[in-house]
Image (tube, rainbow, N blue to C red):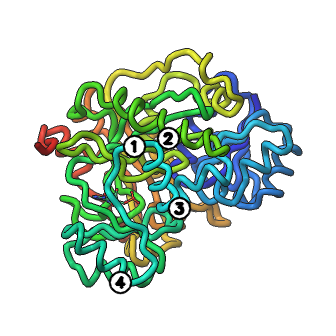
């Protein structure tokens, strides 16, 4: 099989490793890719958000599958443009990607499908936002209605700050606060059949102990030793299948990767958000444990044949990834610094580029993801931090507590 992968971050480097490791893949092409992806794929300088350019590249290279990593190409209609050429694409249509692209649309689908989630109001002016904030009380949760690359959500006890965010965004979803540990569940689907991957947990705040501003994600681990028995089955029954049925009923079936972000509350799992693509950096740990060949799985989802796909096989043990971020991230990341020690197995490239002289340079807020597996979570965590210790990047920072609470048995479900 020949595969074209779109994107150039850490998630795509992890996908590239999985795709290249599938014995059925004879050629992997990536656009635009990154220096890490370049070690397993041929890179093409095509804009992944340009539907016509991507479709032309897919035709030119004669690929059997296009795998779309980030959300922006999905919302731009890249999957539709590729499918219009008769080429299978892993990723939802622009219409179906609204599950991620619009928080208000996602809430509407969840309500229609009876999916357990936070109560919420969509507000377009300060008065209605203020009313909603006062009805739910603190902590306040205000979400920008549009795509904000994971950074459009404010969770705060400061009512004035919550209201300011609502006013700045214009159209927001104000919702009740969900208390409980968070779970990311990835589901591969062809619109009807659906296959869950291992649940993972990521770390959104920049600082140890969940302090500081939200980021794109500072680390992740899988599996979750503290997850309630039957969690995945319950989420498939109460969330995933009703959502897929509602999307199909609307004439916009969702095929691709449905990312279910959940809080495990005293009343059970509640959906925090849907995404329409693999999460970053959870992908790095989930795929590190997947033994089933990745391209075959994604091809089955892209061709409506997932029901006939064999059950997934997983490696024993656990995986941990620790993000190494640039100085100033998330507010104002510095780029262009030389990185050494990063071209070793397990170090996933998220924001790197190659200088003309061959040096590896930082080129984004999240620069690298030190990813390791181990016999258990403690061993995987030690191995991931050993990788971090081998990387040199001036001014970089990382969290030191990724997976620590899980290793130490400190995660509890309220109630
Ligand atoms: P989202 O972009 O919707 O995932 O929100 C980003 C982060 O904000 C989530 O990972 C949660 O940590 C937090 N968050 C979002 N919605 C809620 C909620 N209703 N209750 C508690 N925390 C939330």
- Disc assigned to residue 127: 4
Q: Residues within 10 Å of mark 2 (few under 14, many from 20)?
A: many
- Name which of mark 3 and mark 4 comes first in the sequence: 3
Above/below status of 403 relative to 210:
above
Label 3 vs label 1, nearer the camera: 1
Query: Could you tell me if the residues under marks 3 and 2 are in contact, i.e. CB atoms within 8 Å?
Result: no
Q: CA distance from mark 1 to mark 4?
A: 28 Å
Q: Position of residue 410 (x, y in %)?
A: 12, 43
Q: Residues within 10 Å of mark 3 (few under 14, many from 20)?
A: many
Identify the element where label 3 is drawn: loop
- Name which of mark 3 and mark 2 comes first in the sequence: 3
- Name which of mark 2 and mark 1 comes first in the sequence: 1
Disc 2 residue: CB within 8 Å of ligand 1: no
Query: Could you tell me if the residues under marks 1 and 4 are in contact, i.e. CB atoms within 8 Å?
Result: no
Residue ranking furthest to the right: 60
Quarter holding residue 119: bottom left
- Residue identified by numbered label 2: 243
Residue drawn at (13%, 38%) of the image = 409
Q: Is residue 411 visible?
A: no
- Name which of mark 2 and mark 4 comes first in the sequence: 4
Identify the element where label 1 is drawn: loop
- Disc assigned to residue 102: 3
Identify the element where label 2 is drawn: helix
- Residue identified by numbered label 1: 115
Quarter holding residue 232: top left
Query: Could you tell me if the residues under marks 2 and 1 are in contact, i.e. CB atoms within 8 Å?
Result: yes
Q: CA distance from mark 2 to mark 1?
A: 7 Å
């Amino acid at each position: 099989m020949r595969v074209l992968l779109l994107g150039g971050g850490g998630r795509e480097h992890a996908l590239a490793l999985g795709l290249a490791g599938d014995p059925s893949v004879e050629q992997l092409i990536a656009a635009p890719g990154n220096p890490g992806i370049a070690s397993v794929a041929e890179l093409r300088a095509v804009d992944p958000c340009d539907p016509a350019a991507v479709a032309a590249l897919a035709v030119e290279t004669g690929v059997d599958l296009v795998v779309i990593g980030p959300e922006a190409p999905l919302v731009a209609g890249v999957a539709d443009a590729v499918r219009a050429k008769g080429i299978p694409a892993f990723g939802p249509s622009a219409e179906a990607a609204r599950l991620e692209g619009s928080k208000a649309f996602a809430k509407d689908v969840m309500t229609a499908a009876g999916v357990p989630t936070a109560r919420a109001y969509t507000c377009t002016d300060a008065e209605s936002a203020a009313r909603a904030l006062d009805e739910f009380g603190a902590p306040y949760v205000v979400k920008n209605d549009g795509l904000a690359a994971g950074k459009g959500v404010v969770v705060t006890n400061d009512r004035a700050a919550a209201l300011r965010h609502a006013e700045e965004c214009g159209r927001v979803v104000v919702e009740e606060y969900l208390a409980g540990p968070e779970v990311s569940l990835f589901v591969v689907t062809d619109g009807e059949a659906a296959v869950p991957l291992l649940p993972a947990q990521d770390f959104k705040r920049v600082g140890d102990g969940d302090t500081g501003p939200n980021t794109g994600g500072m680390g992740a681990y899988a599996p979750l030793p503290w997850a309630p028995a039957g969690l995945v089955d319950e989420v498939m029954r109460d969330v995933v299948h009703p959502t897929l049925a509602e999307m199909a009923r609307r004439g916009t079936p969702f095929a691709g990767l449905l990312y279910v972000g959940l809080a495990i509350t005293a009343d059970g799992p509640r959906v925090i958000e849907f995404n329409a693509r693999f999460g970053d950096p959870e992908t790095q740990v989930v795929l590190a444990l997947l033994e089933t060949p990745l391209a075959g799985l994604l091809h089955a989802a892209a061709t409506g044949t997932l029901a006939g796909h064999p059950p997934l096989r997983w490696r024993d043990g656990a995986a941990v990834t620790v993000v190494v971020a640039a100085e100033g991230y998330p507010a104002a990341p510095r780029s262009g610094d030389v990185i050494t020690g990063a071209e070793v197995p397990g170090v996933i490239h998220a924001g790197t580029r190659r200088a003309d002289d061959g040096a590896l340079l930082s080129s984004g807020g999240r620069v690298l993801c030190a990813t390791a597996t181990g016999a258990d979570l403690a061993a995987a965590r030690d191995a991931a931090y050993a990788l971090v210790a081998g990387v040199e990047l001036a001014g970089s920072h990382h969290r030191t507590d990724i997976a620590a609470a899980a290793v130490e048995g400190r995660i509890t479900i309220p109630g």
